[in-house]
């Protein structure tokens, strides 16, 4: 696409109000804040080796995980940009034990993992910012309990993937739209207005280091994926980067299944419901895929804690059907 033909975010939202929930003006304002924050994250990550942003920050989050300097940087960028946008009443972030109140008059709640997979930055592997937005149902001071919502209530969800290029993917429940970042002049331009995931695929993504502590059904599914065809060639291929956004995005485009089940190290699952699984599940469903926490739909879970974890199964429709058939 020639640069003079680029469709920028403003134009896409303004020309397609029906794709942007009840209030495209608010949605655009929130998306602009996400663009602003992720542009800063992009610029910093791309020069990470030259700046003092690599490595651990020297603290742990509420889940006992080592916080990276880039986690804190990304978190600050999102908080600042969302505060300025005025529509967000409070944020639940992976990096903050408690919710952060921003604007009491804001009509929306924002949940985010500002930099997922951040331990990969030091080794130059893709990372992502994940976000989820709910419309408030009450006014006034926000309480933590307000975040106890069903995943299907999200009105905006998506991620920014800082990969070989930086892309913004989002949905408001009317398809999945993707934008590519053009570093000069720092704009996100429409790349695909309606991503659809293949119904079939051959990629399975799971951390097999956990194999011995997996449920028998999941072990059997992994064995199934490793079965050979009659001609001795493989039926599936394994891919696991340890960076959820990158692993999911690849599978969404190529066809595959990503599984992060309960393990001995993470008995509830490792990934967080509100700001990792919910938004990615909404993207998957909108692209024609399936997301569960086992045999049940993930978006039907009602959150009970902002940092709660869940087992996570997500991917192409027919591959997911097959994987689920091993569970019961
Ligand atoms: P993080 O939020 O601390 O970065 O952890 C989440 C990441 C996901 O991106 C990835 O799917 C998972 O952790 C991989 O974990 P592991 O390497 O422990 O299996
Ligand atoms: Mg994370």
Image (cartoon, rainbow, N blue to C red):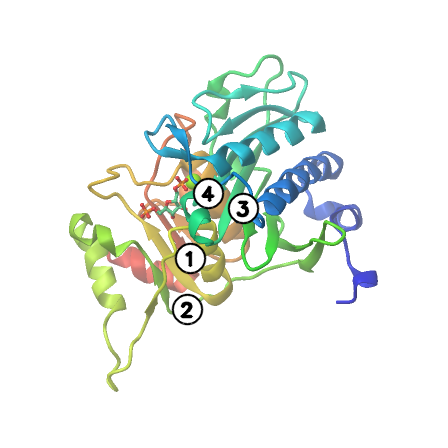
Residue 271 at x, y percent in the picture: 37, 41
Q: Is mark 4 within 8 Å of ligand 2?
A: yes
Q: Which residue is mark 4?
A: 116
Q: Secondary structure at mark 2?
A: loop
Residue 311 at x, y percent in the picture: 32, 43
Looking at marks 1 and 4 on the same chain, the residue that comes earlier in the sequence is marked by 4
Q: Secondary structure at mark 4?
A: strand
The residues tagged by marks 4 and 3 sit, at their Cα atoms, a distance apart of 16 Å
Q: Secondary structure at mark 3?
A: helix
Looking at marks 2 and 4 on the same chain, the residue that comes earlier in the sequence is marked by 4
Q: Quadrant of the N terminus?
A: bottom right
The residues tagged by marks 1 and 4 sit, at their Cα atoms, a distance apart of 19 Å
Q: Quadrant of ligand 1?
A: top left
Looking at marks 1 and 3 on the same chain, the residue that comes earlier in the sequence is marked by 3
Give the vertical position of 223 relative to 246 (above or below).
below
The residues tagged by marks 2 and 4 sit, at their Cα atoms, a distance apart of 25 Å
Q: Are marks 2 and 1 in contact (CB under 8 Å)?
A: yes
* Numbered circle sitting on residue 315: 1
The residues tagged by marks 1 and 3 sit, at their Cα atoms, a distance apart of 32 Å
């Amino acid at each position: 696409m020639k640069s003079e033909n680029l469709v920028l975010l403003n134009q896409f939202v303004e020309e397609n109000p029906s794709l942007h929930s009840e209030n495209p003006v608010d949605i655009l304002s929130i998306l602009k804040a996400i663009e602003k924050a992720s542009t800063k994250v992009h610029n910093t990550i791309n020069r990470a080796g030259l700046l003092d942003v690599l490595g651990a920050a020297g603290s742990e989050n509420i889940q006992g995980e080592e916080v990276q300097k880039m986690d804190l940087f990304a978190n600050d960028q999102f908080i600042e940009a969302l505060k300025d946008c005025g529509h967000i009443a409070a944020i639940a972030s992976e990096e903050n034990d408690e919710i952060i109140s921003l604007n009491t008059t804001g009509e929306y709640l924002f949940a985010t993992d500002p930099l997922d997979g951040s331990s990969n930055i030091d080794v130059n592997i893709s990372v992502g910012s994940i976000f989820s937005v709910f419309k408030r149902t009450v006014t006034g001071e926000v309480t933590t309990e307000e975040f106890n919502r069903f995943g299907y209530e999200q009105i905006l969800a998506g991620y920014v993937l800082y990969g070989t290029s930086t892309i913004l993917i989002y949905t408001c429940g009317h398809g999945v739209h993707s934008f590519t970042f053009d570093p000069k002049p720092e704009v996100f331009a429409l790349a695909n207005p309606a991503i659809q995931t293949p119904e079939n695929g051959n990629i399975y993504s799971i951390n097999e280091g956990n194999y011995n502590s997996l449920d028998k059904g999941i072990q059997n599914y992994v064995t199934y994926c490793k079965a050979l065809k009659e001609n001795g060639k493989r039926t599936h291929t394994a891919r696991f980067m340890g960076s959820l956004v990158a692993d999911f995005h690849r599978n969404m485009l190529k066809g595959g299944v990503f599984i992060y089940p309960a393990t001995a190290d993470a008995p509830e699952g490792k990934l967080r419901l509100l700001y990792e699984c919910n938004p990615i599940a909404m993207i998957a469903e909108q692209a024609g895929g399936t997301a569960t926490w086992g045999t049940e739909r993930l978006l039907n879970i009602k959150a009970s804690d902002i940092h709660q974890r869940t087992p996570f199964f997500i991917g192409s429709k027919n591959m997911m059907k097959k994987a689920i058939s091993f569970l019961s």
